[in-house]
Image (cartoon, rainbow, N blue to C red):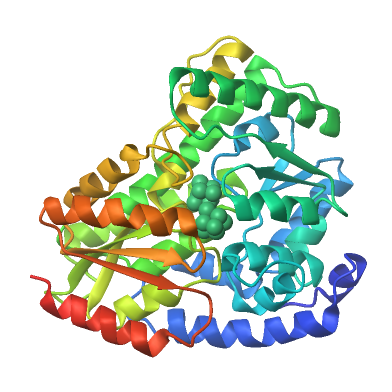
């Protein structure tokens, strides 16, 4: 990584501890990513971003702050980026995906909290993540209990706004979410000092729709027999999409998708024929959580799609661009975001339908339903997911894991055995 020490010092980071993280990341990335053969050239952009992960984008954000822009840190795909962008703000994802941050979270949270929450809180409290230091405001949501309580801790030293998400999807819930989005828009206007107009919001809606379409193109490339990109590479693209500038993200994804389309035409696959096609479903995989993809793709499988928030839930469904009033736009945003299917909703039949649909669209041989330890929502929903898949005649394996490597060998054995029986 280039020299960003002065910037990290100014951000009040714990440099000694942060150095330890900077030392392990390149090796982990080399082992998991650079060891792959015949990667698309377009992945060079994402490799570069990872090599500068705590430098290049944070430096851009700080520059933007100097020019008067505000940075909003978010933790969930229900928070509408469009509203922030319409007020000339910037959104950055903040979810932690490394075991490195978990002990810091465990200092204040019960050990029986999901690793995603522990890592996110640890990254903030240990002062080892520049994105947490840079964000002017955090935006939480009332999805799961662990997050709700974590917000109270994070709110102690950063302005925190919490969106109250409905737990069902009736008409009145969709209307309620539209009202929550409107209330959030007012907070964003006050915080940035910028008015959200119909024109600005429409422009922001189009920007994020373009990003969604570009990401969808990359995913579409793995629907056929030829698999031109590994699941690991596609996951990296998705993980970084949460941090990057949305217009640049769309450009880079489109460029990658062009290359993948050409590869498909030329019959260039990154996996040998007969590799088993896997759909992953479950809890999100925040950067740098590459554990499961790596195990699957070095055990005779290829992850061709993720029904996850770090997957299809992030980009499927567009926001209607034809609304001419703010009220109509807030409603259109609500309708799109409420099509997301998080396990915090009840009933959540939309997610079950999505999984079966995606399994067919991506012609998978089997589904792996993954749960982050202590996420009781996805764990419980696993029962319905597995039942539906069995009824549809699609093989399924349910697993639970965390960010440590202690279960890696056991997972390798179970996943290897599952892949063995497919087809
Ligand atoms: S929309 S999945 S990003 S809430 S894994 S922290 S649910 S205990 S991350 Fe999520 Fe939004 Fe839902 Fe997606 Fe809680 Fe479960 Fe942990 Fe989770």
Position of 83 with respect to 278 (left or right) is right
The percent coordinates of residue 350 (x first, y second) are: 33, 38
Residue nearest the viewer, comparing 1 with 334: 334
- Write the residue at 33% across / 53% down: 219
Where 236 falls versus 1 (above or below)? above
Is residue 322 visible in this depiction of the protein? yes
Residue depicted at x 33% and y 57%: 382
Q: Is residue 380 left or right of residue 247?
A: left
Please tell me which residue lies in front, 242 or 309. Answer: 309
Q: Is residue 403 above or below residue 161?
A: below
Residue 25 place in picture, x, y as percent: 61, 81
The residue at 18%/57% (across/down) is 265
From where the camera sits, is residue 55 visible? no
Most extreme residue toward the left, as rendered? 423
Q: Residue furthest top?
A: 324
- Quick one: 187 or 22, which is closer to the camera? 187
Q: Residue at x 64, y 26 (%)?
A: 180
Quarter placement of the N terminus: bottom right
Residue 268: name its quadrant.
bottom left
274 on left or right of 312: left
Q: How many marks?
A: 0
For this rendering, which residue is in front, 161 or 152?
A: 152
Tell me residue 386's x, y (percent). 24, 57
Q: Is residue 196 left or right of residue 24?
A: right
Q: Position of residue 248 (x, y in %)?
A: 57, 49
């Amino acid at each position: 990584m280039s020299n960003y020490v002065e910037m990290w010092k100014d951000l009040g980071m714990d440099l000694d501890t942060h150095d330890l993280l900077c030392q392990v990341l390149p090796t982990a990335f080399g082992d998991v990513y650079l060891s792959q053969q015949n990667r698309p050239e377009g992945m060079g952009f994402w490799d570069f971003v990872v090599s500068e992960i705590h430098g290049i984008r944070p430096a851009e954000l700080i520059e933007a702050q100097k020019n008067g822009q505000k940075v909003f840190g978010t933790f969930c795909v229900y928070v509408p980026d469009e509203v922030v962008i319409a007020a000339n703000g910037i959104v950055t994802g903040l979810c932690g995906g490394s075991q490195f941050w978990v002990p810091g979270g465990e200092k204040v949270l019960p050990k029986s909290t999901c690793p995603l929450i522990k890592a996110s809180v640890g990254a903030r409290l240990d002062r080892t993540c520049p994105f947490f230091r840079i964000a002017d405001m955090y935006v939480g949501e009332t999805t799961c209990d662990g997050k709700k309580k974590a917000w109270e801790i994070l709110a102690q030293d950063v302005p925190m706004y919490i969106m109250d998400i409905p737990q069902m999807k009736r008409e009145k819930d969709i209307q309620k979410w539209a009202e929550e989005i409107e209330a959030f828009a007012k907070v964003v206007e006050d915080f940035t000092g910028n008015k959200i107009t119909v024109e600005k919001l429409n422009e922001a809606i189009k920007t994020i729709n373009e990003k969604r379409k570009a990401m969808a193109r990359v995913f579409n490339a793995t629907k056929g027999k030829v698999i031109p990109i590994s699941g690991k590479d596609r996951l990296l693209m998705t993980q970084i999409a949460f941090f990057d500038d949305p217009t640049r993200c769309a450009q880079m994804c489109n460029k990658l998708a062009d290359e993948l389309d050409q590869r498909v035409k030329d019959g260039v696959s990154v996996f040998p024929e007969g590799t088993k096609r896997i759909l992953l479903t479950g809890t999100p995989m925040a950067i740098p959580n590459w554990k499961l993809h790596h195990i699957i793709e070095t055990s005779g499988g290829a992850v061709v799609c993720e029904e996850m928030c770090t997957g299809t839930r992030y980009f499927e469904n567009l926001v209607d661009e034809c609304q001419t009033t703010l009220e109509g736009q807030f409603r259109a945003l609500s309708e799109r975001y409420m099509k997301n299917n998080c396990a915090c909703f009840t009933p959540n039949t939309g997610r079950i339908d999505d999984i079966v649909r995606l399994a067919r669209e991506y012609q998978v041989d089997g589904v792996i339903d993954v749960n982050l330890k202590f996420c009781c929502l996805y764990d419980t929903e696993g029962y319905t997911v597995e039942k539906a898949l069995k009824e549809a005649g699609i093989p399924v394996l349910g697993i639970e894991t965390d960010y440590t490597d202690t279960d890696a060998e056991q997972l390798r054995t179970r996943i290897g055995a599952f892949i063995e029986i497919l087809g």
